[in-house]
Amino acid sequence: MSIFIDDSTRLVVQGITGRDGSFHTNQMLEYGTQVVAGVTPGKGGQSFTADNGTTVPIFNTVEEAVEKEGANTSVIYVPPAFASGAIMEAADAGIAFIVAITEGIPVMDMTRTYAFVKDRGARLLGPNCPGAITPGVAKVGIIPGQITTPGPVGVVSRSGTLTYEAVNQLTEAGIGQSTCVGIGGDPIIGTNFIDTLRAFGEDPATEAIVMIGEIGGTDEQEAAAWVQEHLEIPVVGFIAGQTAPPGRQMGHAGAIISGSAGTAEEKMKVFEEHGIAVAKRPVDIRALIQEALAG
Amino acid sequence: MDIHEYQAKELFRAAGVAVPPGEVATTAEQAEEIARRYGGSVVVKAQVHAGGRGKAGGVKLASSAEEAREHASKILGMTIKDLTVQKVLVTPIEDIASEAYASVLIDRETQRPMFMVSPEGGVDIEEVAENRPEAIRKLRIDPRYGLLPHQAYSLATFLYDDPAQVKQATKLMGQLYEAFTSNSCSLAEINPLIVTPEGDLKAIDAKVSIDESALFRLPEVAAYRDLDAEPAAETKAREAGLSFVKLEGDVGCCVNGAGLAMATMDLVKYYGGEPANFLDIGGSSNPDKVVAALEIITADPSVKSILFNIFGGITRCDDVANGIVEAARRIDIQPPIVIRLTGTNETEALEILKEAGFSAYTSMDEVVEKAVELAAQA
């Protein structure tokens, strides 16, 4: 078992003919993901031929990809100016799980898009996220498959490469993952920590969770309270940005300490108060998760 | 992107918000001339991207044009939170009967724009929020429908009792929301929003931050960027497509990805060092970016060692390795460089670096410890 993606995932790639879209379509196919369609307006009727020889039909709209190929999941690699529209198109076409990789979507666009997607009952992951991977089954997005291995630990993170670092630590220590999810570094995201933790909590294959947060906002604090109240499996936490100065955006649009709110220190303290073991360094995740699994 | 008060006021004026007149001066003589036109009784306000201008002595009242010149000559060139004041806003003094607070920002919890208003204006709103939360009204707005008439009215009645002021404030809330959305702000704040003895509402101070991601479609707002108001290294980084924030330490950091970059800085501190910067080279592995990153890091004289931490995903390690080799050829790099590369094309990268005489690591802890040690030895 896993969360969000499994062997029933039938993926449509929005922006399949672009530089990033085509590169990652190859990677996803190679990993074994069922990529059933691509969408690029104006290129309907053509097809995408992968490096491994697989051909994927291209449609003008997501609606056609759903009708003709039974797509149920979409991944978005379109430029920021059009990404918000692409997300709403996918939700309108009945896609249940939408993964937006695009970085730099205007926040005002996302406020409307978020409300739109909610209304249609779809789940949005991202934007500005690396996607999700269920090791050995399928990946949607850009997480490198070779660093993952199947197992009992769920990983959820606001970051991209820091997720890889954490997953790699687990894999090197011989600990596999059920699903690894990057929820994204923007202020407005479709799936937050609590949404992901809830899904892991309901997944029988997930026995422990690694939660990787960073400075800015209060999502981690709310998640910590939720964990204590609702989650029965252990959680190990890590927070990036202990050395970040207040008032400065640290790369991610959402990574900013406002006043005294959103510091790493505060988040780590709240984690500990709610029974989440805090790793001081990424490498410490190994021992803490081993302990959690043994306990 | 933060913009200056005078620019924020231009945006507010364009949306119909009542803002007193004002002009910008870059010399004391200009300030005097403007003050004379306003009759001499003016406020001279430092234009810098920092809060607490008043406390720092950057806001002064003048009762004559000569006095305005004297104030301007002191304020221009002064340093407020490491920023040098290069412009002052000269604006007529307004008589104040009462001060309130009004802002719109993005509420991350509900993922919606949110109004915050308080009848207690002219003070630090975070302080009010902490000590008297009941003095603040928060109202979330559905971005699809915008600010509805009854919502604007309810905000206005939280601030004022007088029907004429309620009417003005109701209109102002709509104008503030319009300024917020049409300029893709992350914050649009009026503090204080005053009532004059005649009963007129006016925004006498304004603070606006713009969502960087929306600047591509707002060329006029993008032109507000004041290159003098940001350190040269940050301008260079932005133009090269890098995220960079200067810090106080001596270990230069060059990392791919914002989260990993922060975690690397934290690890430097863990091993007893201090990071000199936050630098995210982003997802692409264009060697030119690596060269630009090294130019920025080596331009900082306090940097004693340089640390690369690259986890290849989209970023290919061999591209970064080529960038490092290329940079070493093009620029004179004094501080020692230590490199950690792992992930996509790691083997090729290690080969390239070895051939060029660099030593490389595959563990993050190892490389950070080494960088801290080298900085301490220098």
Image (tube, rainbow, N blue to C red):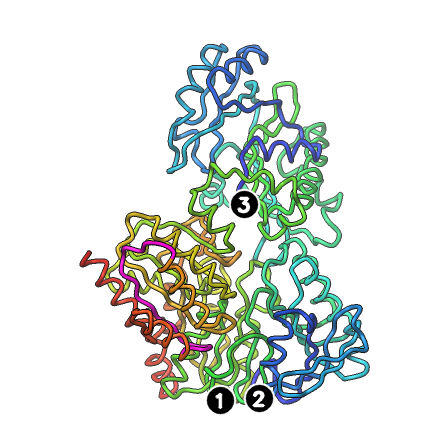
Residue at image position (40%, 87%) is: A175
Residue B125 position within the rendered picture, expressed as x and y whole percent measured from the top left: 49, 40
What subunit carries mark 3? B
Above-or-below relation of B8 to A71: above
Above-or-below relation of B5 to B116: above
In the shown orientation, is residue A193 left or right of residue A15? left
Label 2 with label 3: CB-CB less than 8 Å: no
Quick one: SS at disc 3? Answer: loop
Residue at image position (31%, 56%) is: B333
- Looking at numbered disc 2 in the image, what kind of residue is underneath it? Val
Residue B141 position within the rendered picture, expressed as x and y whole percent measured from the top left: 67, 51
Quick one: SS at disc 1? Answer: strand
In the shown orientation, is residue B11 left or right of residue A147? right
Read off the magenta span: B330-346
Any part of residue A228 in sight: no
Q: Nearer the viewer, residue B60 or A74?
A: A74
Provide the residue designation for mark 1.
A150
Provide the residue designation for mark 3.
B1
- Mark 3 to mark 1 CA distance (whole Å): 43 Å
In the shown orientation, is residue B313 left or right of residue B57? right
Quick one: SS at disc 2? Answer: loop
- Looking at numbered disc 1 in the image, what kind of residue is underneath it? Pro
Q: Which mark is residue A137?
A: 2
Q: Residue furthest left?
A: B377
What subunit carries mark 2? A
Label 2 with label 1: CB-CB less than 8 Å: yes
